[in-house]
Image (cartoon, helix red, strand yellow):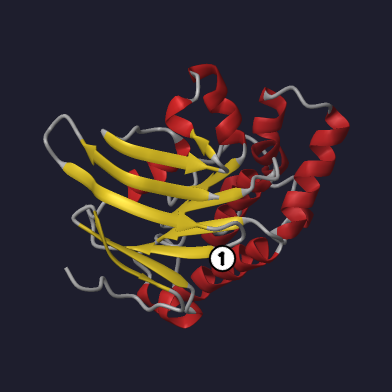
Amino acid sequence: MIEMHHVTKIYSNGVKALDNINIEIKKSEFVFLVGPTGAGKTTFLRMILREDSPNEGQVIIDGRNIEKLHASKIPYLRRNIGVVFQDFKLLKTSSVFDNVAFALRVMGFSGSIIKKQVLRALDLVGLAHKKNMFPLELSGGEQQRVCIARSLVNNPAILLTDEPTGNLDPDISWEIMKVLMEINNHGTTVLVATHDKNIVNRLRKRVIALVDGRITKDENRGTYDYGEH
């Protein structure tokens, strides 16, 4: 599903964000990506989205070397990858329904398909009953669940989440993680970049640790530590 072969990324300021990364993440896996600030976690996610390109190596998504994709094909790649941010990025003057529907409208789907897909996504995150409310009327945890619904509305095969619980209290963070696990149970490959030690230790999923752009640990049923480096 997701492969990186000898991937190195060096930015123009000389920072080596990724250093000879070799990894394979299979379909339907649930993976935590951990490491200190500046370890390369966000760059790792950006490589999968083709928002950054490696200086060396290959990034393979579903059997395709995405570095060889024509620019016109990149939006189609991204339609199959859902993304959840720490800071929500919701449209404050649009309803929950319209926030989730936004991408489908841009892609030109019919009203009936949009309604079906949006309500399915909202139902999955437990917010169908709040579809007519606005983001500022929701709690932080509910806003994050709207973000998750928005990322799922196009039935992506991969879900990338960058610090999805970073602004939430522990109880709400756990509710968000239960939603992500349920999504994973439906067959979506889920990759969570996080600093939330308690959640990582509690769930004991696969843990990939990055330090200074290098993988220092890749462990099934892992815990929150960075391995040897």
Q: Residue 223, located in which quarter of the rendered image?
A: bottom left
Q: Residue at x 55, y 34 (%)?
A: 78
Residue 143, image x, y percentages: 57, 53
Q: Residue at x 66, y 47 (%)?
A: 152
Q: Residues within 10 Å of mark 1 (few under 14, many from 20)?
A: many
Residue 193, image x, y percentages: 40, 58
Residue 100, image x, y percentages: 67, 41
Q: Is residue 48 left or right of residue 185?
A: left
Q: Is residue 85 left or right of residue 211?
A: right
Q: Is residue 195 above or below residue 121?
A: below
Q: Is residue 27 left or right of residue 43?
A: right
- Residue placed furthest toward the bottom: 202
Residue of label 1: 176
- Quadrant in the picture for the C terminus: bottom left
Q: Is residue 58 above or below residue 195?
A: above
Q: Secondary structure at mark 1?
A: helix
Residue 53 seen: yes
Residue 137 seen: no
Which residue is at the front of the view, 129 or 161?
Answer: 161
Residue type indicated by callout 1: Ile
Q: Residue at x 78, y 27 (%)?
A: 109
Which residue is at the front of the view, 175 or 28?
Answer: 28
Residue 110, image x, y percentages: 83, 26
Q: Is residue 119 above or below residue 91?
A: below
Q: How many marks?
A: 1
